[in-house]
Structure formats: structure tokens, C-alpha cells
């Protein structure tokens, strides 16, 4: 395929000019110390930190397409401290100390990514400018205040709450009544990041076999198909780093649900337009609606803007035709113009998307079953760009048998329940999406917190 069609991030990097020539497929059976299924950010960060700990390790990454083909190369470019569960939810489940440790680890990860890309010479437009989340009505204002209060209670993220006068004086969001400003987030170009880390681990001796489809694994033996031939990889540890694409494998199946998130990118905007919008380089932005939207100002002065709303497909199906939706594209264009009127009517140059991984309890996890010779990480629910780095560091410690602060975090060893069989999974997942859209309409009409959102909370991770 033409890998430039993956989206703006792939289309805008130097490799696009060379036609994205894939790396060689696996040509023979192999025996390695660690076999990693998937050459996205989870797999690549795991390889990177394993190499840091022991440069002699034989590491093989098995990728069905090309490195970064999945969510790692399609996301919104937020290197943030976001984790699917809030600090309050983590505290209720694991206790306050564990919740603070998990949150602090996520905040530290933002800086760790910046440190590594600088040290490895990966130019991925990393700028730590924070996130601005706008509250645009009374209900969203309550959500903003709750986020600020949680920050004060747990003392990790240190969110600032800006009032109406400050927000309207600085940003071109005319109906904003407040905004939270969260410092622990950096803008990155995810295509440059994932492809750059792939080159970094190769320079250190890891092998990335692209165009190599994993058929399954058991007890350290991985079956693959490459160039039409089935081959075997024997490994001391197999790392499942497939995220949403794991739903296509028997080892994962109903443990993950592939939910599509779609994006648009505008043409480069003039300095005059950006002055009216107010978003600076390095800043990411969103608002407090239920049907999530997210955006950034790219290094070349575009708006990259995305959101949920694409439906879940029966049987956890994944197909290139699902990467774009005229309905969702129109929704994103309309929403962007409503949020920033200065951006209304600008030319849209790219539209793309892909599946992210959602576990049944919306709880990301990392772990190792030494007896089964299997490690895993994923279930990031769209918060994976930086969480993958924390996962890679943690997996490296687990595989090496080291007890560290990372291996003691509460997400280590968590196992989510399986999603319901079809058609219940199809009905529930799509009901949740429709409900979140309806919840936003309900709150705008009533000025009160949505009863629909409250009723659907068990299906949406809240």
C-alpha cells in the first residue's frame, strides 16, 4: 500500500518522498531473547529500554505492516500525563499513595520522552507547552473546577484554573467561560517520533521484521507468516504490543475493543489567524464535552484536530475503509469552526483515523507472566503516546526481574474483564457513542449535568 495514506503524520515526513520502502520480512526461523509483537511505540520503547539495560539482548520486533502503522503513527500528538483512570478513581481502587505514584509516574514520563528524543537525536517537534481545556458552559465549568480540585487534592499535575476574562483575552474561543491549563503535556509529531525511535533501536542492534504477520504464540514460540511462508520464532519472552489490533488475535480477542478515532489537518494558517486563535507552539487543546475532541498546533502552523464519534464495527472488525468517515469529518470541521471561529472555512488537507484499544474497564495495564513467557501492555484508551514509554520502561524492569518503583505501580499486573460476546458488544459500544453525543446536546439544552451520561457511565469507563 501507499503508506502516505495512513494520514498527515506519515505523509509529512521525509520517508514519504522515498515511498516508505518496508524493511525486509522475516526470511528464516529465529531464536531470540525477546520477541515483540508489534512495532508501534509500546514495542519500540520496550526494545529501547531493554537495550539500555542489556545491550547484548537479541531483540526481534514483528510487524505486519510498517513500524508505527497503527495508533502510534495516527494519534493527536499529545505527549501528556493523561491516564484512562483519574487520580480519584485510582485512589478509590488502590489507595491514595498508589494513585499519587501512578500520576507522578505519568507526569515524569512527559519529561522522559523529551530527554530520550533529545539524546537519541529524534527530531519530532517536541515542545512542552501544556494543555488548554476550555469550559464553554456552566456544566463544563463544573467539570473544569472538579479537575482543578482533584489536582489540588493529589498535588501532582498542578492544574491552573483561568477565569472568563483571562481566557477570552488570550484565546479566540468566544463562548469560553473558563479553562484549565495543565503543564504536563508536550506537542509532538507522532510520525517522526515513532519512526525515529524505530531507527534508534535498529542502530543498537534490534531487528524489525516488517510485512511479517504474527499468527499466534504460546510458551515462547511465535508463529508468523512472511512472504507467504509460515515461520517460527522462539523467544525467552514474547511481548504483546498490539494494542487495538490485538482483537484480531486469538490470544487477545475480547480482552480489547478497537474503537476508531478520526482526525483532520488544516492547511498552514497565517500568523494573523494564529494570533486570533491564541494557541502557541507546543500547546495542545480540548474542551470538556463528553464526545472527546483534541487538537494541536503543528510545527508548520496547521491545526491537527481529532475526536471520537466513529462507530464500532461488528466483530471488532478493522479495515482501511473505516479510517475515514464523511460524517465524522464534517463533525470535526464544524466543531473546529465553533471552537475557533478564526479557523472556520480553512482548507482541510488531510482526513484519517484508526483504531485505539479499549479494555472493558477502560484500565490500561502492563504485566508479565513468566511461566507463560508472555508480557503485555496496552488498553490506553487513546492516552497512549506517553503511556507507551512508561510501559516500555516497566516491561524492561519486569523482564529483567528487577523490583523498582515502576514495577510497584498499581497498573502492573492488572487484568481487565473480557468484553461481551457479539452482538452485545456491538450494541453496547455504539450505544455509548450515541449517548455521549446525546449527553452534550442534553447539557447544552438544559444547562445541567447529563442524565444520559450518568446512566451510560459504566460503558464509558467512568
Image (cartoon, rainbow, N blue to C red):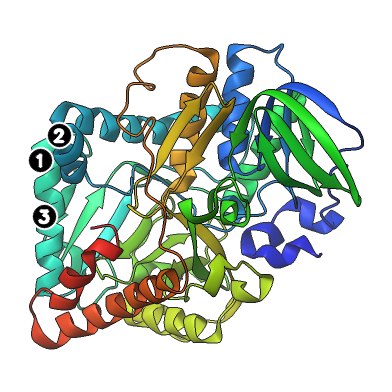
Where residue 322 sits, quadrant-wise, is: bottom right
Helix, strand or loop at mark 2: loop
| Vertical arrangement, residue 52 with respect to residue 389, above or below | above
399 vs 383: above or below = above
Q: Are marks 3 and 1 in contact (CB under 8 Å)?
A: no
Q: Is residue 43 left or right of residue 309?
A: right
Q: Is residue 223 left or right of residue 71?
A: right
Quadrant into which the C terminus falls? bottom left
The quarter of the image holding the N terminus is bottom right
Query: Compared to 265, does 405 lie above or below?
Result: above
Q: Residues within 10 Å of mark 3 (few under 14, many from 20)?
A: few
Give the percent coordinates (x, y) of residue 150: 12, 45
- Residue 196 location, quadrant: top right
Instruction: Say if residue 350 shows up in the picture.
Output: no
Q: Residue at x 52, y 63 (%)?
A: 301
Q: Which residue is mark 1?
A: 152
Query: What residue appears at the point 60 percent right and 54 percent down from the top-left corner?
Result: 245
Residue 155: which disc? 2
Given contact means CB atoms under 8 Å apart, are the residues at marks 2 and 3 in contact?
no
Of pointers 2 and 3, the one earlier in the residue sequence: 3
Q: Work out whether residue 15 or residue 40 is closer to the camera in this orientation and state it.
A: 40
Q: Are marks 1 and 2 in contact (CB under 8 Å)?
A: yes
Residue 350 horizontal/vertical position (percent): 61, 73
Callout 1 secondary element: helix
Front residue of 2/182: it is: 2
Residue for badge 3: 146
Amino acid at each position: 500500500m501507499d503508506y502516505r495514506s495512513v494520514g498527515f503524520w506519515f505523509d509529512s515526513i521525509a520517508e514519504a518522498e522515498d515511498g516508505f520502502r518496508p524493511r525486509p520480512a522475516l526470511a528464516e526461523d529465529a531464536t531470540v531473547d525477546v520477541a515483540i509483537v508489534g512495532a508501534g511505540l509500546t514495542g519500540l520503547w520496550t526494545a529501547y529500554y531493554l537495550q539500555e539495560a542489556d545491550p547484548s539482548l537479541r531483540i526481534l520486533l514483528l510487524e505486519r505492516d510498517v513500524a508505527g502503522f497503527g495508533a502510534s503513527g495516527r494519534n493527536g500528538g499529545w505527549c501528556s500525563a493523561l491516564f484512562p483512570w483519574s487520580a480519584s478513581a485510582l485512589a478509590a481502587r488502590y489507595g491514595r499513595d498508589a494513585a499519587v505514584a501512578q500520576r507522578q509516574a505519568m507526569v515524569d514520563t512527559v519529561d522522559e520522552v523529551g530527554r530520550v528524543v533529545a539524546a537519541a537525536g529524534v527530531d519530532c517537534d517536541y515542545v512542552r507547552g501544556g494543555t488548554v481545556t476550555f469550559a464553554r458552559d456552566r456544566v463544563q465549568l463544573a467539570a473544569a473546577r472538579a479537575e482543578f480540585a482533584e489536582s489540588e487534592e493529589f498535588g501532582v499535575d498542578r492544574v491552573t484554573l483561568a477565569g472568563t476574562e483571562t481566557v477570552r483575552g488570550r484565546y479566540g474561543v468566544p463562548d469560553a467561560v473558563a479553562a484549565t491549563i495543565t503543564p504536563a503535556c508536550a506537542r509532538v509529531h507522532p510520525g517522526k517520533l515513532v519512526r525515529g525511535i524505530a531507527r534508534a533501536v535498529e542502530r543498537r542492534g534490534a531487528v524489525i521484521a516488517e510485512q511479517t504477520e504474527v499468527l499466534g504464540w504460546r510458551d515462547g514460540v511465535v508463529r508468523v507468516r512472511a512472504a507467504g511462508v509460515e515461520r517460527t520464532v522462539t523467544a525467552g519472552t514474547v511481548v504483546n504490543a498490539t494494542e487495538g489490533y490485538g482483537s484480531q488475535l486469538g490470544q487477545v480477542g475480547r480482552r480489547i475493543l478497537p474503537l476508531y478515532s478520526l482526525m483532520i489537518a488544516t492547511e498552514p494558517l497565517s500568523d494573523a489567524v494564529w494570533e486570533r486563535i491564541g494557541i502557541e507552539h507546543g500547546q495542545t487543546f480540548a474542551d470538556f464535552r463528553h464526545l472527546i475532541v483534541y487538537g494541536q498546533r503543528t510545527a508548520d502552523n496547521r491545526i491537527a484536530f481529532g475526536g471520537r464519534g466513529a462507530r464500532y464495527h461488528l466483530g471488532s472488525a478493522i479495515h482501511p475503509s473505516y479510517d475515514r468517515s464523511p460524517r465524522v469529518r464534517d463533525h470535526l470541521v464544524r466543531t473546529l469552526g465553533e471552537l475557533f471561529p478564526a479557523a472556520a472555512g480553512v482548507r482541510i488537507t488531510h482526513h484519517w483515523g484508526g483504531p485505539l484499544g479499549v479494555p472493558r474497564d477502560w484500565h490500561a495495564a502492563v504485566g508479565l507472566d513468566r511461566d507463560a513467557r508472555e508480557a503485555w501492555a496496552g488498553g490506553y484508551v487513546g492516552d497512549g503516546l506517553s503511556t507507551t514509554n512508561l510501559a516500555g520502561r516497566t516491561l524492561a524492569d519486569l523482564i529483567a526481574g528487577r523490583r523498582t518503583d515502576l514495577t510497584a505501580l498499581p497498573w502492573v499486573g492488572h487484568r481487565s474483564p473480557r468484553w461481551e460476546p457479539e452482538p452485545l458488544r456491538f450494541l453496547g459500544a455504539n450505544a455509548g457513542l450515541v449517548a455521549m453525543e446525546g449527553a452534550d446536546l442534553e447539557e447544552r439544552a438544559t444547562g445541567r449535568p447529563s442524565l444520559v451520561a450518568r446512566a451510560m457511565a459504566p460503558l464509558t469507563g467512568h
